[in-house]
Amino acid sequence: MASQNTTVQKGGITSFFRGVKQEMKKVQWPTKQELVRYTIIVFITVIFISFIIMAVDFVFMEIFKLFSKLV
């Protein structure tokens, strides 16, 4: 089994938040135009998937109604 190299860092919570701040500076944030474009894509995708689920639900509902009439 491979040995795991673990080190314990001192500093506690302040060290943690310092590290978070440093990592957040490395993040490449989207521009306003990109953010708007991505949001529109998400809304369109959600609406499209909702219609697919609604259609499948309608089909199964009609199938179950048909079976319930036979029984």
Image (cartoon, helix red, strand yellow):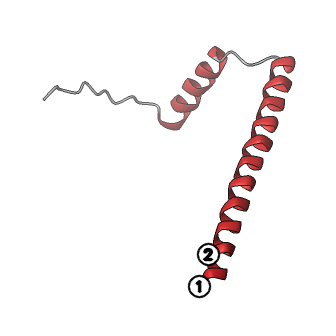
Give yes or no for contact between labels 2 and 1 (Cβ–Cβ under 8 Å).
yes
**Quadrant containing the N terminus in the rendered view:** top left
The quadrant in which residue 2 appears is top left
Above or below, comparing residue 50 to residue 62 in the picture: above
In the rendered view, does 48 fall on the left or right side of 67? Answer: right
Q: Secondary structure at mark 2?
A: helix
Above or below, comparing residue 40 to residue 29 in the picture: below
For this orientation, the residue located farthest to the left is 1
Q: Secondary structure at mark 1?
A: loop
Count of picture labels: 2
Which residue is drawn at the image coordinates 58% and 25% (left, top)?
A: 18
In the rendered view, does 65 fall on the left or right side of 1? Answer: right
Q: Which residue lies under the disc numbered 2? A: 67
Label annotation for residue 71: 1
Q: Nearer the viewer, residue 29 or 8?
A: 29
Q: Nearer the viewer, residue 24 or 52?
A: 52
